Amino acid sequence: MNIETLRWQNNHLEMIDQRVLPARFEYLSYDSAASVAEGIRAMVVRGAPAIGCAAAYGVALEALRLNKTAPETFRSGMEKGFANLAQSRPTAVNLFWALQRMRQVWEGMNAAAPAVVAERLLDEAHEVHAEDIRINRAMGAAGAALLADGAHVLTHCNAGALATAGWGTALGVIRSAVEAGKKISVIADETRPFLQGARLTAWEMVQENIPVTLITDNMAGHLMAHGEVDAVIVGTDRVAANGDVANKIGTYMVAVLARRHNIPFYVACPLSTIDLNIASGKDIPIEERAPEEVTGFRDCQWAAPGVKTRNPAFDVTPAELVTALITERGVVREPDKEKIATLFHQKQL
Ligand code: MRU
């Protein structure tokens, strides 16, 4: 099954509603920057690269929506659209990367008519989308060699097709290893509180007949201690210049456990997720989400009413716990500031 997380249909953006998977598989339709921003905020679409693609389409939709207005109205409307999208979620740097890329295209067009700008921005959004799939394929090719035939690979959250334009980052590496003929079985952490592992990763793997075993997050240590995990592979929302990795809450615990048990801990990371403006992980903004996600799930609330909660959606794994970053430009073992800087001087994909 080819999972199209985002697709362009009849001059609208359509996105799979990831809040209702796997019970229901349905697309929602978007026609403006404001509506796409709301879709990102509400987690209809989630996962760093997918958020970046959605933001790029959000900019293009806004330009199309305003393309018959006077240049001044167009400019102020576009600025509002950019600001709205930038405020949707704080941690995944792909959002800001995509907005910056779209802004550069727009500003590079000087005094072009709004309709011309809109068409060009739509082309760019299509390119961001298509490029993401190419990058995921390249990461898959680079990373597949790291997984042994027969490996049991633990993953946290969902870094699959649903988190990207297609194929996936961490799950993309697993897909590529399977495509290369290796037998891989996946252990999916449930990923409390939003359940991306239970609802999305398990669903993706089941669709493709890749063997998958679902565990709750607190079972990972037990399985590692019993030799049931050969490697860990996760995605990321932002990597600092020194190699510290922000990813879904709980990733740090998994990385510490992996080091304790001498299990390699890999991070699949497109260059668009590396933020050279942030020196170390402690400066990465961490989203704090609603208490209701901790006190229950959807309509079922099980905690004592009024109890105080914390709900950081991401944590930071220090670079020293990362065995390797898997990028579209190859594998970077024991990532550090110098190795990461060098990546950006290599040839474009
Ligand atoms: O809150 P989410 O579901 O957007 O968080 C997603 C993750 O943490 C993913 O692991 C990360 O974005 C990498 S996706 C290829």
Image (cartoon, helix red, strand yellow):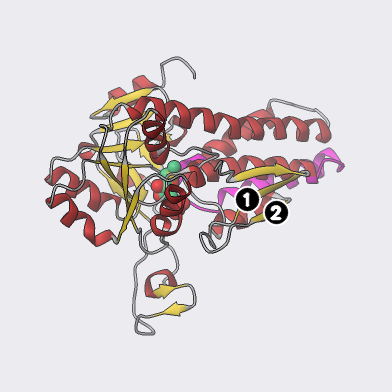
Residue nearest the observer in this picture, 72 or 198: 198
The reply to whether the residue tagged 1 has its Cβ within 8 angstroms of ligand 1 is no
Residue 157 in the image, given as x and y percentages of width and height: 38, 52
| Other residues around mark 1 within 10 Å, as few (<14) / some (14–19) / many (≥20) | many
**Which amino acid, mark 2?**
Ser
Q: Looking at the image, do the residues carrying marks 1 and 2 touch, with CB atoms under 8 Å apart? A: no
**Mark 2, secondary structure of its residue:** strand
Pointer 1 residue: 15
Write down the quadrant of residue 131 in the picture: top right
The reply to whether the residue tagged 2 has its Cβ within 8 angstroms of ligand 1 is no
- What's the mark number on residue 145? none
Residue 221 in the image, given as x and y percentages of width and height: 18, 55
Residue nearest the observer in this picture, 175 or 14: 175
Drawn side of residue 163 relative to residue 283, left or right: right
**Mark 1, secondary structure of its residue:** strand
- Residue extent of the magenta highlight: 65-94
**Which amino acid, mark 1?**
Met
Reply yes or no: does residue 338 show up in magenta. no
Pointer 2 residue: 29
Reply yes or no: does residue 68 show up in magenta. yes
